[in-house]
Image: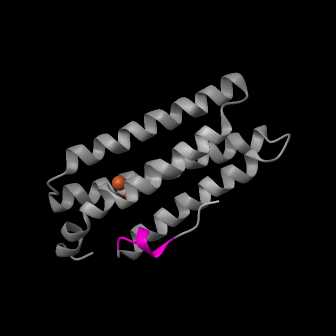
Amino acid sequence: MLSWDSSYSVGIQEIDDQHQKLIDFINELELALGKSDNRETVVKVLNGIVFYTKDHFAQEELYFRQFDYDKTDDHITEHADLITQVEKLVYQFEVNGTFDIPNVIEFLKAWLIEHILGADQEYVSCFKENGL
Ligand SMILES: [Fe+2]
Ligand SMILES: [Fe+2]
């Protein structure tokens, strides 16, 4: 299971709350995958992840445009890549009823932490300069 670490903080409460929620979702998925007869829950949690992640990305991207952030394009590309990959996983699960569970969990964890510690940290000074 993944737990929140203060090093993940971007120092903006609203964004930290959203990142924590994403971590909660991944943990929920890991729990659901550990149970048998879990198909319905897994689909529900996966769809929740897609929905909530899109929402979070949209919020960040709104700020990028409002604040005329200089790395907007690269950052949006990273977001779009993740959504594409996760939607592919949801599709695979819906079609096959299964997927490579440990890989999916590790992929989501690695992506999220790498992104929060990397690209997301890069906008902090811009967001703060603009009053967040
Ligand atoms: Fe983020
Ligand atoms: Fe981001």
Image position of 94 with respect to 121: above or below: above
Image position of 92 with respect to 124: above or below: above
- Residue ID at (67%, 38%): 101
Quarter of the C terminus within the rendering: bottom left
In the picture, residue 62 is in which quadrant?
bottom left
- Residue ID at (47%, 34%): 85
In the picture, residue 129 is in which quadrant?
bottom left
Between 52 and 2, the one lying in front of the other is 2
Q: Residue 97, percent across and down?
A: 73, 28
Q: Is residue 11 left or right of residue 68?
A: right
Q: How is the image coloured?
A: one colour
- Residue ID at (23%, 44%): 74
Q: Is residue 8 left or right of residue 46?
A: left
Quarter of the N terminus within the rendering: bottom right
**Most extreme residue toward the top, as rendered?**
95
Quadrant containing ligand 2? bottom left
Q: Residue 54, percent across and down?
A: 44, 48
- Residue ID at (53%, 58%): 22
Residue 66 highlighted magenta (yes or no): no
| Count of picture labels | 0
Q: Is residue 76 left or right of residue 69?
A: right
Q: Is residue 33 left or right of residue 64?
A: right
The span picked out in magenta is 5-10
Q: Residue 99, percent across and down?
A: 67, 31
